[in-house]
C-alpha cells in the first residue's frame, strides 16, 4: 500500500464519519488532490486487495471499511 492509498483511506473514513455515506469518486479526487479518477480507482483496488475496504459492485457509494478503524465493518451505502 502506498502513502497516497493511506491518505485516501483516511479521507474516506473522515468523510463517512461526517456524512454517514461514502464519497463519490469526484469527491475523493478533490479530497486528496488526485488529478484523475484512474488514480482513485487504482488506490481503491489496492485498498481492497489489502483488505482495508470492501466495495459492493454495481452500487453507488457503497464501501465498507475493514480492519482496526473507527468505522470497522460498518456497511455504508445510499
Image (cartoon, rainbow, N blue to C red):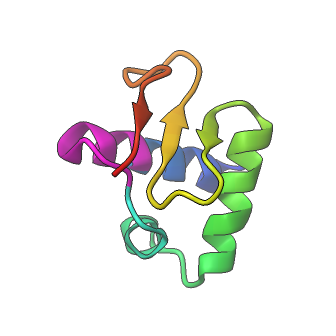
Q: Position of residue 70 (x, y in %)?
A: 37, 20
Is 35 positioned to the left or the right of 30 in the image?
Answer: right
Is 2 positioned to the left or the right of 12 in the image?
Answer: right
Kindly give the residue lying farthest to the bottom in the view shown.
35
Circle count: 0
- Residue at the image position 53 percent from the left and 15 percent from the top: 68
Vertical placement of residue 38 versus 45, above or below: below
Q: Position of residue 69 (x, y in %)?
A: 46, 21
Magenta stretch holds residue 40: no
Kindly give the residue lying farthest to the top in the view shown.
68
- Residue at the image position 38 percent from the left and 59 percent from the top: 23
Q: Position of residue 9 (x, y in %)?
A: 51, 44
Vertical placement of residue 36 versus 25, above or below: below
Vertical placement of residue 22 versus 41, above or below: above
Magenta stretch holds residue 13: yes
Please provide the residue range marked out in magenta: 12-22
Confirm whether residue 21 shows in the render.
yes
Kindly give the residue lying farthest to the left in the view shown.
18
Is 43 positioned to the left or the right of 13 in the image?
Answer: right
Confirm whether residue 1 shows in the render.
no
- Residue at the image position 66 percent from the left and 72 percent from the top: 39
- Check the picture and name the quadrant holding the N terminus: top right
User: Mostly what secondary structure, the magenta segment?
Assistant: helix
Amino acid at each position: 500500500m502506498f502513502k497516497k492509498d493511506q491518505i485516501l483511506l483516511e479521507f474516506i473514513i473522515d468523510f463517512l464519519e461526517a456524512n454517514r455515506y461514502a464519497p463519490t469518486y469526484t469527491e475523493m479526487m478533490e479530497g486528496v488532490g488526485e488529478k484523475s479518477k484512474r488514480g482513485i480507482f487504482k488506490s481503491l483496488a489496492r485498498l481492497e486487495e489489502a483488505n482495508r475496504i470492501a466495495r459492493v459492485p454495481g452500487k453507488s457509494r457503497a464501501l465498507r471499511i475493514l480492519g482496526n478503524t473507527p468505522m470497522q465493518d460498518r456497511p455504508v451505502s445510499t
